[in-house]
Image (spheres, rainbow, N blue to C red):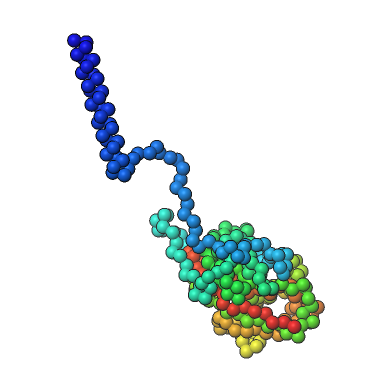
Amino acid sequence: MKAWLSKLGAQRLLLVTGLVASLAAASLAAGYLLEPASDSPASAMPDPSGPSNSPTESKRTSPSTTPTTHRPTTTKATSTTHRPTTATANPDTQAPAAPVSKSCTKPVFKTSDRNGGWSTSGYYVHNNMWNSDESLGPETLYACSYHNWYVVSDQTNHAGAVKTYPNVHKDYDNTRISSFNRITSTFAATSPHVGIYNVAFDIWTNGVATSGSTEIMIWTENFKQVPAGNKVTRVSLGGRTYNVWKTSDNHYIALVPTAVMRSGSIDLLGIFKWLMSKGWLPSSSTLGQICFGVEIVSTDGRNATFSFTDFSITDN
């Protein structure tokens, strides 16, 4: 009896073993085989939109060793009902991609660094996310040249504070303004008309962002923004009419045109001389830096593209 049971057990073992082998063979033939589970995430796909290898992202090396340290202003939004956007969409849904520039289609430089920049041809293209006192959203700058670049920014409004000032600029070694016979600049920019911002020249005299500096701004396009200080006069210069704002200490002066200036040329030296004639800029003033870019307060919490398609400075 025991012999018969042992024989029956062996036959069952052979039957089970054969069944397992048959299942394994069938799995291989079908092209799938169970593997041990892994806790390691899948490898990330390479970013096809990464920066070109040339030139590489750099800190300022030329013409100056100190990037703009743009100080906060007390500007507030003109619209009292404007509030930060509150997302109601599915949290897994990403914001729609902002349109890329129509002119800078193959950028040679890209940076998302808050102080990233590129020195080229005597100018510096700067992703100047200067306001560290605020919660900043992402911002990426793409450049084909110093006169052809764009920035994609995503900012929300926090009590009207300026968050970033991406720009292109040229540095001066505190040269006396009175020594120049000419300082003119060409410019062109296209903006998205969302949020709060102003496209503007930002010119530093008597040092760059120091306690004794005078900051002179020329807003070429204003979208729901208000300068610091008070409106003190209106003036026509170079065929354009500006409302002039300034602080009581004359350390901040803004010329806001009555009509949008999307492109053109500006006689900067003529503006300096007019400010000197008003006693708001000392006649002994020196020139530190001339910038052109956009002060961004908000993009309504979504990606927005600002394109700059011309910039040059002629001086002698």
**Residue at 58% over, 62% down:** 53
Nearest to the observer: residue 166 or residue 33: 33
Horizontal relation, residue 94 to residue 233: left or right: left
Depth order, front residue of 40/225: 40
**Res 27 quadrant in image:** top left
Q: Quadrant of the C terminus?
A: bottom right
Residue 225 seen from this side: no
Whether residue 246 sits left or right of residue 224 in the image: it is: right
Q: Indicate the quadrant containing the N terminus: top left, top right, bottom left or bottom right.
A: top left
Q: Nearer the viewer, residue 242 or 299?
A: 299
* 198 and 51: which is toward the camera: 51
Q: Residue 255 sits in which quadrant?
A: bottom right
Q: Residue furthest top?
A: 1
Q: Residue at x 45, y 47 (%)?
A: 42
Occupied quadrant, residue 212:
bottom right
Number of on-image labels: 0
Q: Position of residue 173 (x, y in %)?
A: 77, 72
Q: Position of residue 38 (x, y in %)?
A: 43, 40
- Asked if residue 218 lies left or right of residue 37, the reply is right
- At x 57%, y 61%, the residue is 112
Give the residue at the far right of this rendering: 284
Residue drawn at (65%, 62%) of the image: 58
Residue 294 image offset from top left, x and y in percent? 59, 71
Q: Is residue 14 visible?
A: yes
- Measured from the top left, where is residue 197 in percent x and y? 56, 71
Task: State the residue lying farthest toward the bottom.
Answer: 239
